[in-house]
Amino acid sequence: MLPIVAVQEKYAASYRACLDVVAREKRYLAQIEALPLERIEGFVKDSVAADAIQFFALNQEEVVGWADIFPSWPHAVAHCGSLGMGVHPNYRGQGLGSRLLSACIQKAWAKGLTRIVLQARADNLHAIALYEKFGFKNEALKSQAMRFDGEYFDAVQMRLLRDEA
Ligand SMILES: CC(C)(COP(=O)(O)OP(=O)(O)OC[C@H]1O[C@@H](n2cnc3c(N)ncnc32)[C@H](O)[C@@H]1OP(=O)(O)O)[C@@H](O)C(=O)NCCC(=O)NCCS
């Protein structure tokens, strides 16, 4: 079984490469390419320092999937975290997404978050099925929330409450 590990600086470049592959699919993530390596390195460094809710799936020390939940900072919404995730296309359907999500949710609750939110393109049925499996509920359909090459797509906003989990 491939390992799931907490964020570490040594995986920054590999994480960026995996993120870039998924972003370039131009269908699932809001970004269509990864940020430059220096930005990712800084971001990963900050994540490690903050003991962030961020996990990587590895195959022989290469990142093949990631999931993270970043808390909001203002006081009244500091109990909320935003989920993002992706698995390299060659590694989907093997349970990595579920294991990454499970690790993130457990750590989110342990760190005191009580609400996790995400936005998924409304036609991203695999992702939505995964989130529903974990108890996420659909909160809103956001019209024309995403745009790729001039074409608009609706998105669903989903949430998981600790009280309901
Ligand atoms: C969504 C994603 C992270 C799921 O990762 P994964 O490793 O494939 O997930 P798993 O193998 O753990 O499968 C989890 C659930 O997803 C759904 N799923 C995954 N692959 C599926 C498939 N081929 N057909 C139907 N459902 C599928 C199922 O509900 C599955 O649960 P089950 O195995 O108990 O039936 C992955 O498909 C991905 O990276 N997609 C592109 C990026 C993306 O969509 N990110 C999220 C943006 S909101």
Image (spheres, helix red, strand yellow):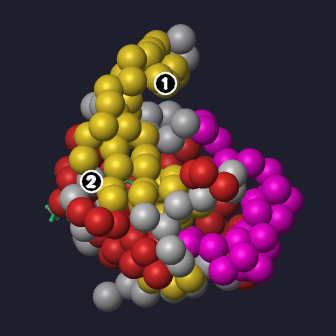
Q: Residue at x 49, y 24 (%)?
A: 146
Q: Which mark is residue 136?
A: 2
> Vertically, is 29 above or below 92?
above
> Vertically, is 50 above or below 22?
below
Q: How many marks?
A: 2
Residue 79 among those drawn in magenta: no
Residue at the top extreme?
150
Q: Is residue 131 left or right of residue 37?
A: left
Q: Which residues are magenta?
A: 31-54
Pinpoint residue 29: horizontal percent, then vertical percent.
50, 41
Pinpoint residue 73: horizontal percent, then vertical percent.
68, 56
Q: Is residue 31 left or right of residue 60?
A: right
| 20 vs 157, nearest the viewer | 157
> Vertically, is 102 above or below 135?
below
Q: Residue at x 85, y 59 (%)?
A: 38
Which amino acid, mark 1?
Met
Mark 1 residue element: strand
Q: Is residue 139 left or right of residue 61?
A: left
| 21 vs 130, nearest the viewer | 130
Residue 37 among those drawn in magenta: yes
Any part of residue 124 in sight: no
Q: Which mark is residue 69?
A: none
Q: Which mark is residue 146?
A: 1
Residue at the front extreme?
76
Q: Residue at x 50, y 34 (%)?
A: 26
Any part of residue 145 in sight: yes
Q: Which numbered disc flags the more N-terminal residue, 2 or 1?
A: 2
Q: Residue at x 60, y 58 (%)?
A: 78
| Image quadrant, ligand 1 | bottom left
Which amino acid, mark 2?
Phe
- Mark 2, residues whose alpha carbon is within 10 Å: few (<14), some, or many (≥20)? many
The part of the image, by quadrant, that contains residue 16 is: bottom right
